[in-house]
Image (spheres, helix red, strand yellow):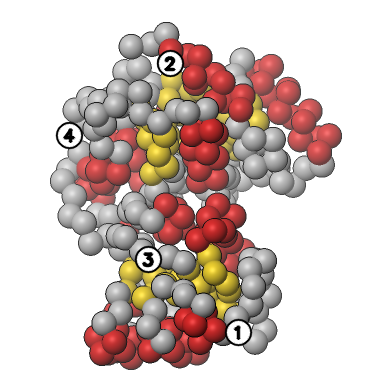
């Protein structure tokens, strides 16, 4: 997918910030790609972008309306369809991370055909994938893994891309979810790939590189310990064939999201990731821990980061709050001495 920019972010009338997490994620990391936001009456989310109508966005040069909101069932409510059709008629393409395909709605499909608009169903790949082969390929790869879902795997991978590039290291963020695809402009949402081809899709996302020192920073999905999503996580681990991984953790949780299973420890995740990852890369190793300290005070966050570092003997940080320098320092030093 090659989605034209700038984006006009559509938030609909969602009831809270969490329901606009796709839009917020894009704005957090690619604000310069975003022209403004469209909010319907009653919307309780705000990305901080300038509010504008679709007509105003089109006049100011917006190229793609991004449906950056979610709802139960992942479908477009009828009153959102009105806005999508209006954007198409104003000359914009449309991108959506919802489960529902845009073209499945007759009004949207007919408008896109009439006006020559492109419809990007970010969650649904048009690329066909082979099964994974597990053959060693040139270049280096780092995968973010989690003790649970929604703990900061995407944010950590993007922060590492920025941190590495600032050091002059060759590094590329590789998106594996709908928000990541919108942030990077390409990628594939692995949760919509047929199970047999997940590892093959992960190989496609992080291909062989001409530069042996180039880092692909692969966005993690789910958790090896989550009963709902471990299958996607394992396929991504085998296909991305990481040389290195960073464990992402949210410290205030006791159970995993949406289920009653207890949260695994960071040690559990490190050991399981190495045990399973060795299938396609015997040299896999943990190079850091990223803790999402958003729910903690500054003092409590710093204390937890320090204590965790002492416990595991690894660089530990909150990538958003404290940056990723400790992990980048470790990776840069470690892989200077490794073949």
Decide: few, some or many residues near mark 4? Use Cα within 10 Å; few <14, some 14-19, many ≥20. Answer: few
Give the spatial CA distance, label 1 vs label 4.
Answer: 47 Å
Real-space Cα separation, disc 3 to disc 1, in angstroms: 24 Å
Which quadrant: the C terminus?
A: top left
Q: Is residue 160 left or right of residue 110?
A: right
Front disc: 3 or 1 = 3
The part of the image, by quadrant, that contains residue 208 is top left
Asked if residue 264 can be seen in this view, the reply is no
> In the structure shown, which secondary structural element does the residue marked by tag 1 occupy?
loop
Q: In which quarter of the image is residue 236?
A: top left
Q: Which residue is drawn at 65% across and 87% down?
A: 41
Q: How crowded is mark 3: few (under 14 residues within 10 Å), some or many (20 or more)?
A: some
The percent position of residue 232, horizontal first and vertical second, equals 36, 46
Is 124 left, or right, of 292 in this rendering? Answer: left
Query: Which residue lies at the image location 58% right of the left edge and 67% below the top edge?
Result: 20
Q: Which numbered disc, 1 or 2, marks the residue that appears first in the sequence? A: 1
- Residue designated by label 3: 4
Residue occupying the point 48% across, 37% down: 161
User: Which residue is label 2 attached to?
Assistant: 335
* 10 Å crowding of disc 1: few (<14), some (14-19), many (20+): some
Residue at the spot of label 1:
40
Where in the figure is residue 26, as x and y percent of width and height?
52, 58
Mark 4 vs 3, N-terminal side: 3
Mark 4 and mark 2 lie on one chain; the one further toward the N terminus is 4
Assess whether mark 2 and mark 4 are in contact (beta carbons under 8 angstroms).
no
Residue that carries the numbered disc 4 in the rendered image: 133
Nearer to us in this view, 277 or 158: 158
Give the mark nearest the N terminus, 2 or 3. 3
Assign a secondary structure to mark 3: loop
Of tags 4 and 2, the one toward the viewer is 2
């Amino acid at each position: 997918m090659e989605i034209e920019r700038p984006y006009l972010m559509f938030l609909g009338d969602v009831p809270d910030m969490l329901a606009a997490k796709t839009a917020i994620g894009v704005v957090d990391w690619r604000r310069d790609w975003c022209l403004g936001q469209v909010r319907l009456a009653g919307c309780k989310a705000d990305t901080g972008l300038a509010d504008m109508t679709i007509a105003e966005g089109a006049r100011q040069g917006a190229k793609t309306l991004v449906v950056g909101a979610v709802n139960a069932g992942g479908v477009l409510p009828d009153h959102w369809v009105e806005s999508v059709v209006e954007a198409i008629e104003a000359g914009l393409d449309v991108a959506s991370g919802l489960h529902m395909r845009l073209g499945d709605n007759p009004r949207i499909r007919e408008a896109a055909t009439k006006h020559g608009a492109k419809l990007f169903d970010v969650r649904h790949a048009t690329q066909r994938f082979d099964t994974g082969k597990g053959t060693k390929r040139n270049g280096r790869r780092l995968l973010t893994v989690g003790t649970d879902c929604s703990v900061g795997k995407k944010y950590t991978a993007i922060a590492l891309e920025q941190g590495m590039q600032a050091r002059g290291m060759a590094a590329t963020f590789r998106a594996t979810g709908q928000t990541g695809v919108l942030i990077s402009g390409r990628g594939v949402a692995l949760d919509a790939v047929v199970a047999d081809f997940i590892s093959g899709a992960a190989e496609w996302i992080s291909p062989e590189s001409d530069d042996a020192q180039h880092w692909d920073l692969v966005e993690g999905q789910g958790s090896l310990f989550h009963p709902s999503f471990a299958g996607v996580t394992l396929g991504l681990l085998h296909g991305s064939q990481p040389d290195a991984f960073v464990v992402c953790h949210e410290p205030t949780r006791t159970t995993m999201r949406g289920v009653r299973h207890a949260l695994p420890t960071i040690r559990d995740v490190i050991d399981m990731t190495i045990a399973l990852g060795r299938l396609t890369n015997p040299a896999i190793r943990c190079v850091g821990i990223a803790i999402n300290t958003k729910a903690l005070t500054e003092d409590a966050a710093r204390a937890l980061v320090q204590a965790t570092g002492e416990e595991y003997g690894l660089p530990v940080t909150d990538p958003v709050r404290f940056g990723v320098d400790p992990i980048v320092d470790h990776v840069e030093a470690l892989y200077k001495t490794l073949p």
